[in-house]
Image: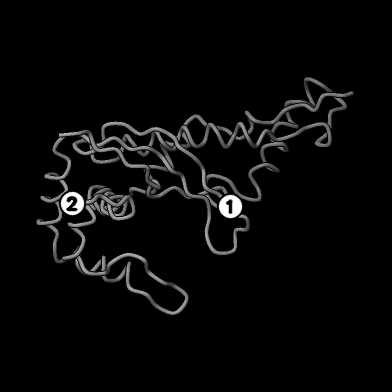
Amino acid sequence: MATTKLSMSLPFFPGFYESWLFNSDTEYRAIQNELDYYREEKPGVTEDNLDFDYESYKRDAIENFIEAWKSLAPADIIEAVEFDELDSPRYYNFRTDYLYCTVTFKEGWQGVMRKFMDENKESLRERIRKDWSSYDGFISFMDNDIEAWPVHLFDDPDERYVGSMIRYMMEAENDDIRDKIIYETMDDFYAESYVREREVA
């Protein structure tokens, strides 16, 4: 059987707009905290002399998130996770960033997922109906009937359905899955490390 690989949006990624990963205070607080160091080591340096290296911060935050996500994803399903791209909207009016990665699945992953679905069918039926039924302000492009999902999961795997089912599996395994991902992503990861002194021309 050929190895299954899908480029999919990782569940639980919060994006870089007013989230725990980055918000309007992140840069300001990092610079203010670094000023304490500069006041002692380099008197005369002010916040006007400091910049926040957002691109480096973003790159490393994504790397940390991927590592955290993989460590908490179903171990008997996920083999590897590799960064593809960060899909950012032109304006953050309706959605935040999506983190796309190539996910390699272990042999037999479909059997594991089928078993989870069989054991949790009624709760999943309600969850899928709730999550994927259209309403005012939301148009669903996914089927809200669990009976239609196996085709999109196993016959012709669709990253939207597979990613959503993995999300349900992770939530079932960890009641506080979001908090665990946050903790592992941000462990030993400090915004202050990305403050740079501006070079004087």
Q: Earlier in the sequence, mark 1 or mark 2?
A: 1
Q: Amino acid at mark 2?
A: Asp
What x and y, as percent, mark residue 41?
78, 20
Seen in the image, is 190 located left or right of residue 186? right
What x and y, as percent, mark residue 123?
18, 65
Which residue is located at x 10 percent, y 57 percent?
118
Which residue is located at x 67 percent, y 33 percent?
53
What x and y, as percent, mark residue 179?
39, 47
Seen in the image, is 25 located left or right of residue 117? right
Which dot marks residue 60?
A: none
- Between 2 and 145, which is closer to the camera in this rendering? 2
Which residue is located at x 65 percent, y 51 percent?
24
Q: Amino acid at mark 1?
A: Tyr
What x and y, as percent, mark residue 194?
65, 30
Judged from the image, the secondary structure of the residue bearing numbered disc 2 is helix
Mark closer to the observer (1, 2): 2
Q: Work out whether 95 lies above or below 76.
A: below
Mark 1 packing: few (<14 Cα in 10 Å), some, or many (20+)? Answer: some
Mark 2 packing: few (<14 Cα in 10 Å), some, or many (20+)? Answer: few
